[in-house]
Image (cartoon, rainbow, N blue to C red):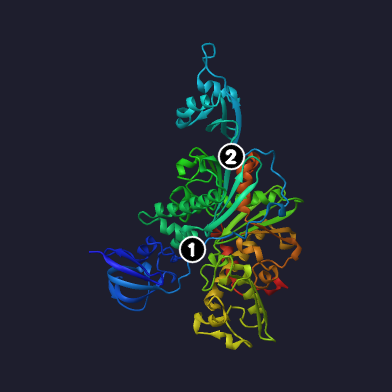
Amino acid sequence: MPYHIDIEPLTLSVKAESGDNLLEILQKAGVQIEAECGGQGTCETCAALILDGLCEIEGRKVDEGVIKTCRASVCADLRLKITDYRPYAGGTDFSVLPLEKLHLTPPGKFSPLSIVKSVKIDQSSLKENESDWGRLTRAAGLNDTAQCSLSVLQRLPQIIRENDGKTIVILSGFESEEKVIDLRAGDYIANYGIACDLGTTTVALHLVDLADGRIISTVSDYNGQIICGADIISRIIYAGKAGKLAELRDKVLNTVNSLIEKSVNEHNISREIITAAVFAGNTTMTHLFLGLDPAHIRLSPYVPAVKNLPVLTAAELNLSLNPQAPVFCSPAVGSYVGGDITAGVSVVELLENQGGIRLFLDVGTNGELVMLGDKWMMGCACSAGPAFEGTGISCGMRADKGAVDSVKIDADAEKIELKVIGGESAKGICGSGLIELTAELFRNGIIDRGGKFSAKSFAHKIKGEGSAKKFVLLDAAENPSGQEISISERDLANLIRAKAAIFSALRLILKMTKINFNHIEKFYIAGGFGRNLNIESAQKIGMLPNLPLKRFAYIGNSSLTGAYLALLYHQQRKNLHKIANNITYLDLSSIPDYMDEYMAALFLPHTDSKLFD
């Protein structure tokens, strides 16, 4: 007999069978409830309050209190309230910078991943009795080894006779092969492609006119997988459960296809004339997108299923594009330095006025670093966690409208100033806001070097006990959004661990290359949180080195930019493979010094304060 599960505040009711996992029931019903740990029971983000009825947890009947839904199973009718329900909502990815701001040098001649040729095919006759395919390849200038799909061959006879032989031929732009993607009768057709950043938290997509490289639209949304785990390790663990790999693939595929749908609907474009795609993502995200088992990414010796992917088709991936559209994925360096970083480094190499020692840092749910010399590159990755994306923080959110991205505290006047993206009422705090808030709390003596509250002022703003003790920036009553905006000692501990992971990785890569911070001529920061990052605040808490501010530059979503360039330039596609092969990958987990560096960085700003003088 099915039971009824009623869910507040959604006024939603679903049916479930005895023994069904409660978190899975909620997720199948479309409830955007987080499970940052991937359903392992090690966090509290999937919490719900029992209002009526009961459930079973580890063989024990529970009929009251707050429960972890990932550990609960159905055994009776149940009415629940999601204790902190904040559904994800798509919007603009503010980390996508206009290309003209980057001053990029084009990587070779314009040569998109698919191209259109208008040809006139001779009609057959008793004297001209070459096959239809033969006349097509001759008119298009293709050789005898040119390829096409069966569906193209099946439509070929009709198409070349529809308009007196005038035919549009859409070809793959790969120089290593000649392949007819599609045919159309006539003498003109628009041709589009997509470039996509497969982020762990956010997926961002450009719709691009392949005739001239114009970006027609840019759209983004939360990655649908986020409810199954906040970071890649949680998702790898989740993927190991029966049927969950397919579920994760479906979730990210649905996210991508919904963004494509949004783009084509806004511009009244047929999906059939989107004939090429380039994707860039970390190694785990690429595996999950393709439905590849990611288990061995986190198991020694940390070997992914693939680093350099063959060109696939949209039909193979169930993408809402022309079925024969070639799909190129940016190659990975290793298990934790993926195609998003390869794409980002390619952007750094194309920036004007290059030379000397450069450092590239991409911070999101993961933290990846690459140091570039004139003829060498070394890269590593660190487990920063999702704090910089606003996840795992009680009032955290991504850098979207309503996010607090800047905080100023005047202890003498007991005054707090907040800046909110979009000028709206505050809904939460994004990564850059968290860093500035932490720096301001430390600068004003409200927290000590360990991130514990030790207020000499603003005592009335500190509430709660233990790790739940919090500093309230805005009471719910004084905030038009009706939400309290605060930061707890638990939040501060998460942020300190994240900044420690970044700085200790920086220190270690410098040791390995025998370079000191002063040798770095340019420090490039990518990723969503860096858009409004206050460099001085990041230095104050010990996340970034104490270099002159003019050496830092923000380059936005470099993964998406690198994918966009690969969509338009054959040389860029070659460059991505060259970069992936040339980066020396440093596995921090195998280096004993890393843990020592990490432990030393778990203070504000560091145990060695001279590093930040």
> Which amino acid, mark 2?
Asn
Q: Which residue position is annotated with label 2?
A: 191
- In the rendered image, the quadrant that contains the C terminus is bottom right
Other residues around mark 2 within 10 Å, as few (<14) / some (14–19) / many (≥20): many
Tally of numbered discs: 2
Residue at image point 62% right, 75% down: 438
> Which amino acid, mark 1?
Ala
In the image, farthest residue toward the left: 1
Give how far across and how far down residue 49 sits, in percent: 38, 75
- Seen in the picture, residue 239 relative to 426 is either above or below; the reply is above
- Seen in the picture, residue 15 relative to 155 is either above or below; the reply is below
Residue at image point 48% right, 45% down: 320
Quadrant in which residue 534 is drawn: bottom right
Other residues around mark 1 within 10 Å, as few (<14) / some (14–19) / many (≥20): many
Give how far across and how far down residue 504 sits, in percent: 61, 65
Which callout, 2 or 1, points at the residue further toward the start of the chain? 2
Q: Is residue 126 or residue 541 the one in the foreground?
A: 126
Residue 346 visible from this viewpoint: yes
Q: Find numbered disc 2 in the image and state the secondary structure of the residue it sits on.
A: loop
Give how far across and how far down residue 147 sits, in percent: 51, 29
Q: Which residue position is annotated with label 1?
A: 230
- Label 2 vs label 1: CA separation? 37 Å
Q: Find numbered disc 1 in the image and state the secondary structure of the residue it sits on.
A: loop
Left or right position of 436 against 19: right
- Contact, mark 2 vs mark 1 (Cβ under 8 Å): no
Quadrant in which residue 551 is drawn: bottom right
Residue 295 visible from this viewpoint: no
Left or right position of 416 against 183: right
Q: Is residue 321 or residue 389 the one in the foreground?
A: 321
Give how far across and how far down residue 378 sits, in percent: 64, 53
